Image (cartoon, rainbow, N blue to C red):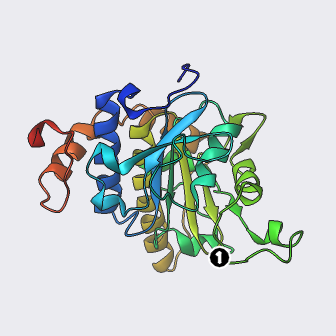
């Protein structure tokens, strides 16, 4: 867990973390978890987090593309920072509510979105996604709109009011109970205690959605994991990001569209 109080300049950030962050952006794009939209962040300190500037994740390539934000208000540490994502409040409010969370992904995966608008819950049915549990919660922006009818109801989470409500769906009393929460008609928020595991959780949430929809289309009953099975498989795979990460680095390094100026291959 991060214990540093504040980081205000990218020169204070580990080059390894910077490199992994950029590779992570590319990996999410490679798996169609993000396109021109969607984003990932990583906690830097108890007060700050980092994410890319307003740029498609696949195009993030250098330290000039990264911005440090304050967790308190989602504002950039440096007043001359480049334009950021309007939904960065998702990240700040999750970090504010859950000190153990070290990374957050926001995705519009079309494999997952159907479960946000259906009465069928997204449930663990694939051993790589036990962390999903027996039913992934769905957060509905309308739960906030009803109290603020004059607000723009475009489904985007562009203020602390909406983002705080969304963050509450992840858990309570500072503890994450659901590492993934769906957003009605919008996408999902994925969290973890490391950047690598946040990407792992994102990839396998999408794969579980694909498996579940395929099984449902067969027409018979689908046998989902029990609470114990979901817990135990989630615990086992929770130790698993160390294995795929070197492969993921190689995969994005071998794609000509991705560039990471902090990787050994491009130095």
Establish if 63 lies above or below 54: above
Write the residue at 68% across / 47% down.
Answer: 170
Write the residue at 56% across / 50% down.
Answer: 132
Establish if 132 lies above or below 184: above
Q: Position of residue 74 (x, y in %)?
A: 62, 47
Q: Secondary structure at mark 1?
A: loop
Most foreground residue, 232 or 18: 18
Q: Is residue 32 in sight in this rendering?
A: yes
Q: Is residue 201 in sight in this rendering?
A: no
Seen in the image, is 253 located left or right of residue 229? left
Q: Which residue is mark 1?
A: 117
Q: Quadrant of residue 117?
A: bottom right
Seen in the image, is 231 located left or right of residue 8? right
Q: Position of residue 204 (x, y in %)?
A: 42, 53
Write the residue at 81% across / 66% down.
Answer: 144
- Number of residues whose C-alpha sits closer than 10 Å to that of mark 1, classed few (under 14), some (14–19) or many (20 or more): some
Number of dots carrying numbers? 1
């Amino acid at each position: 867990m991060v214990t540093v109080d504040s980081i205000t300049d990218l020169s204070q950030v580990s080059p390894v973390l910077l490199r992994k962050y950029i590779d992570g952006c590319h990996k999410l794009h490679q798996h169609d978890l993000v396109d021109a939209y969607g984003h990932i962040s990583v906690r830097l300190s108890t007060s700050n987090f980092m994410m890319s500037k307003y740029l498609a994740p696949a195009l993030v390539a250098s330290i000039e593309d990264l911005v440090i934000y304050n967790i308190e208000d989602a504002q950039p540490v440096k007043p001359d920072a480049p334009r950021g994502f309007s939904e960065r409040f998702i990240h700040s409010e999750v970090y504010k509510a859950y000190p153990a969370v070290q990374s957050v992904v926001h995705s519009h995966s079309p494999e997952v979105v159907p479960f946000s608008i259906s009465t069928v819950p997204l449930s663990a049915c694939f051993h790589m996604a036990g962390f999903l549990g027996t039913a992934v919660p769905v957060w509905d922006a309308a739960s906030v709109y009803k109290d603020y009818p004059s607000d723009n109801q475009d489904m985007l989470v562009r203020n602390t009011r909406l983002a705080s409500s969304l963050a509450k769906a992840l858990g309570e009393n500072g503890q994450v109970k659901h590492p993934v929460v769906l957003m009605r008609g919008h996408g999902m928020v994925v969290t973890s205690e490391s950047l690598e595991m946040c990407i792992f959780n994102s990839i396998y949430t999408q794969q579980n959605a694909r498996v579940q929809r395929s099984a449902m289309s067969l027409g018979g009953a689908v046998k989902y994991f029990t609470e114990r099975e979901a817990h135990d498989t989630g615990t086992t795979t929770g130790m698993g990001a160390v294995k795929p990460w070197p492969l993921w680095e190689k995969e994005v390094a071998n794609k000509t569209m991705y560039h990471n100026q902090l990787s050994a291959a491009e130095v």
